[in-house]
């Protein structure tokens, strides 16, 4: 089984069974060990994947780190696991920080099963950095992220090559985090910078407000255009590769329109205050377009009925779908409260 297939299985497991694998121990057995197995490590060999690893730490007795991975004759990776719903932060680094300094490990991983933060000592030798140089989210693992993760596979593990690339990854990660924050809510400093490039004249409070609003919408349109371009390319490639006439007919009957994509992006923007926008997915069908949480049919957030003259928005805050007429996509904002309440049930 390839690493991409294995990670897809784990992503589905987290999406569908998050309620039953919420504890730290459940995360270890259901997600973390299969994750390490996907990277080629023998999780059944305690000499390679060492559970409850202990080392001599000055002033601390009996402390253990959840796993240590030995490659060759040396401990190379330390792993600390937390519960699935834990927000990973610096307080969780304490044990890894101490153990890193007394072993020859060059990498440390902090994870809650879904998110894996990779640390090293890029800033000061033998001292764990305060920020990860690479973060991998199983539910949002694009091809580039999987490419970076594959460097940690047992078969291709090379400390020097990973470290040579880690500095770049560290900066890329920091820039992505900053840009995502600015996309969601442009800061005053960023708006001022944009205004100096797009507005001639004195930048008043009114101008800043206008540019700030325009910046937010411009970001959304850029993302929407990118989604459209990629979707169009994927659909074209899919059509070219269809070998069955029957499958080709079925494919042609389902067309994801720009309006449906924009509708999904609008719903994402509405509910992002209570649920991570990355968890909101679009799944098209013949008669409607479903907006789902975790790409799970059992977690419907809304339905977009846009394949007819009269548009409808389907809501799921009751016992069954309620269809409400809308004339344009901005009408979706009228139902923000109800969408947010539905999203809270899946948060």
Image (tube, rainbow, N blue to C red):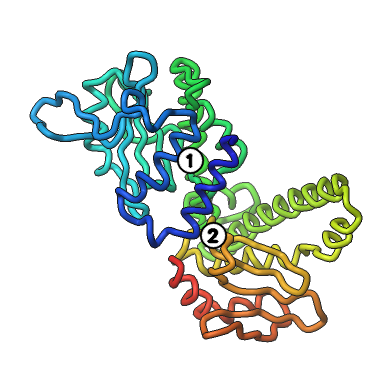
**Disc 1 or 2, which lies upstream in sequence?**
1
Quarter of the rendering containing residue 336: bottom right
Q: Quadrant of the C terminus?
A: bottom left
Picture coordinates of residue 6, whole percent (x, y): 55, 41
Q: Position of residue 8 (x, y in %)?
A: 56, 46
In which quadrant will I find the N terminus?
Answer: top right
Q: Is residue 207 visible?
A: no
Q: Image quarter for residue 55?
A: top left
**Residue at the spot x=35%, y=29% of the render?**
49
Which element carries disc 1, helix, strand or loop? Answer: strand
Can you tell which of label 1 and label 2 is closer to the viewer?
A: 2
Instruction: Name the residue located 59 percent from the left edge and 76 percent from the top edge.
Output: 333
The residue sitting at 65% across, 69% down in the picture is: 290
Question: Which residue has dot 1 on it?
Answer: 136
> Measured from the top left, where is residue 2 in percent x and y?
59, 35
Q: Residue 110 or 166: which is nearer the viewer? A: 110
Q: Which mark is residue 126?
A: none
Q: Up-down: is 231 above or below 79?
A: below
Q: Residue at (50%, 27%) from the top-left corner? A: 153
Horizontal side of 238 relative to 276 (left or right) equals right
Q: Report which residue position mark 2 lands on.
A: 294
The answer to whether residue 90 of the structure is visible from this angle is yes
Residue 246, x across and y down, in percent? 88, 59
Q: Are marks 1 and 2 in contact (CB under 8 Å)?
A: no
Relative to 341, 54 lies left or right: left
Cα gap from disc 1 to disc 2, whole angstroms: 17 Å
Crowd around label 1: few <14 · some 14–19 · many ≥20 (10 Å) = some
């Amino acid at each position: 089984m390839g690493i991409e297939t294995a990670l897809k299985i784990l992503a589905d497991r987290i999406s569908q069974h998050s309620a039953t694998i919420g504890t730290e121990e459940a995360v270890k057995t259901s997600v973390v060990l299969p994750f390490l197995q996907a990277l080629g490590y023998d999780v059944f060999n305690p000499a390679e994947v060492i559970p409850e690893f202990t080392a001599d730490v000055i002033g601390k007795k009996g402390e253990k780190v959840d796993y240590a991975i030995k490659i060759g004759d040396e401990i190379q990776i330390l792993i600390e696991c937390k519960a699935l719903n834990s927000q990973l932060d610096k307080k969780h680094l304490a044990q890894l920080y101490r153990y890193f300094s007394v072993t020859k490990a060059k990498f440390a991983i902090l994870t809650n099963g879904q998110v894996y933060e990779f640390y090293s000592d890029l800033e000061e030798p033998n001292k764990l950095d305060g920020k990860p140089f690479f973060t991998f989210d199983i539910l949002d693992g694009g091809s580039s992220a999987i490419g970076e993760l594959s460097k940690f596979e047992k078969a291709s593990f090379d400390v020097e090559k990973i470290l040579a690339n880690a500095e770049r990854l560290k900066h890329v990660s920091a820039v992505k985090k900053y840009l995502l924050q600015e996309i969601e809510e442009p800061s005053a400093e960023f708006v001022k910078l944009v205004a100096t490039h797009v507005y001639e004249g004195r930048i008043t409070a009114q101008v800043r407000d206008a540019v700030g609003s325009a910046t937010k919408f411009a970001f959304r349109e850029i993302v929407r255009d990118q989604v459209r371009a990629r979707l169009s390319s994927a659909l074209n490639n899919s059509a070219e590769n269809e070998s069955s006439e029957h499958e080709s007919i079925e494919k042609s009957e389902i067309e994801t329109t720009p309006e449906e994509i924009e509708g999904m992006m609008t719903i994402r923007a509405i509910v992002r205050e209570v649920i991570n926008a990355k968890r909101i997915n679009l799944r098209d069908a013949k008669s409607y377009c479903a907006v789902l949480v975790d790409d799970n049919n059992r977690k419907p957030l809304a339905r977009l009925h846009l394949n007819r003259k009269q548009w409808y928005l389907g809501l799921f805050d009751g016992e069954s779908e309620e269809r409400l007429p809308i004339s344009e996509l901005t009408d979706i904002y009228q139902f923000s409260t109800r969408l947010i309440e539905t999203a809270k049930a899946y948060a």
